[in-house]
Image (spheres, rainbow, N blue to C red):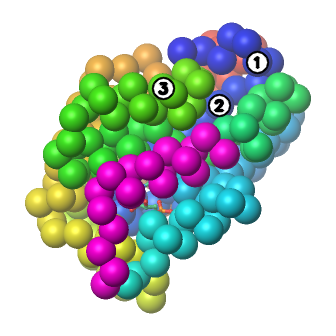
């Protein structure tokens, strides 16, 4: 859904572990700012102060088990707070909001990854987001083996990074399925190439999006 009720624009980046979102988001923000837009960069989970506490519970690398329902509701709770506190006010102020992950992640990870009811989770997402949807989403897509190898070189592996490969394969398949079902909103970008090429692909599409949608 185009954010009709707001003058701002909501953009999200999604992808599996180690897909390069964190590298690409500052480039996209810089590009949009140089085009004259006011940009807010944020993330889920952890884009608010309560969200940071939830992020710590969700991703801290401990052996304490977290029930899948508890995990799901914490991601949704983080999202509801994030939209109320950060995203909606920025959109109302006419800004471009770029979020590192949003509702598609819950469908990919908690529905496809954890093999839970897709329709039920999509409905919970709608409730948590009050039906707000990004106008544009970049899906940074690559085989999970590639992204996980990148993560393993990092000091800070999180709880979900440590899931088995089959889980990450389901997450990727889930993301691709969501993208195929919403081709107008979601742009798949091949993340298995140099960061410069990924940046160029994102920028090309952002330029077209600006021309077409923002004028
Ligand atoms: P990241 O900040 O490196 O993207 O880590 C966030 C982790 O949380 C990542 O493993 C994906 C996961 N996640 C979910 O499982 N469900 C969600 O709804 C969101 C937003 C993230």
- Residue at 71% from the left image edge and 56% from the top image edge: 48
- Residue at 45% from the left image edge and 33% from the top image edge: 125
Marks 3 and 1, the one that precedes in the sequence:
1
Q: How crowded is mark 2: few (under 14 residues within 10 Å), some or many (20 or more)?
A: many
Whole-percent x, y for residue 32 in the image? 74, 39
The reply to whether the magenta stretch includes residue 208 is: no
| Rendered-image quadrant of the C terminus | top right
Q: Could you tell me how far apart the alpha carbons at marks 3 and 2 are, in whole angstroms?
A: 16 Å
State whether label 2 is within 8 Å of ligand 1. Answer: no
Relative side of 90 to 202, left or right: right
| Disc number placed over residue 147 in the picture, else none | none
| Disc number placed over residue 10 in the picture, else none | 2
SS class, disc 1: loop
Which one is nearer the viewer's eye here, 115 or 203? 115
Whole-percent x, y for residue 203 in the image? 58, 39
Q: Do the residues labelled 2 and 1 touch (CB within 8 Å)?
A: yes
Which residues are drawn in magenta?
63-82
The residue wearing badge 1 is: 6
| Disc number placed over residue 126 in the picture, else none | 3
Residue extending furthest toward the left? 166
Which one is nearer the viewer's eye here, 67 or 59? 67
Marks 3 and 2, the one that precedes in the sequence:
2
Q: How many marks?
A: 3
SS class, disc 2: strand
């Amino acid at each position: 859904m185009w954010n009709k009720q707001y003058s701002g624009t909501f953009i999200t980046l999604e992808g599996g572990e180690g897909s390069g979102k964190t590298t690409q988001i500052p480039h996209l923000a810089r590009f949009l700012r140089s085009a004259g837009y006011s940009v807010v960069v944020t993330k889920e989970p952890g884009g608010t102060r309560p969200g940071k506490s939830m992020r710590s519970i969700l991703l801290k690398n401990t052996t304490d088990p977290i029930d899948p329902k508890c995990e799901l509701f914490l991601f949704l709770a983080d999202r509801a707070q994030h939209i109320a506190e950060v995203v909606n006010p920025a959109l109302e102020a006419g800004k471009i909001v770029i979020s590192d992950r949003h509702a598609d992640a819950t469908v990919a990870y908690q529905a496809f990854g954890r093999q839970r009811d897709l329709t039920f989770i999509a409905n919970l997402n709608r409730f948590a987001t009050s039906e707000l949807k990004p106008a544009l989403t970049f899906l940074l897509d690559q085989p999970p083996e590639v992204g996980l190898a990148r993560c393993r070189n990092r000091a800070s592996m999180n709880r979900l990074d440590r899931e088995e490969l089959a889980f990450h394969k389901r997450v990727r398949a889930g993301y691709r399925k969501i993208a195929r079902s919403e081709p107008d909103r979601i742009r798949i970008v091949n993340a298995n190439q140099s960061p410069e090429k990924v940046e160029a692909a994102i920028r090309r599409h952002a330029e077209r999006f600006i021309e077409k949608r923002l004028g």
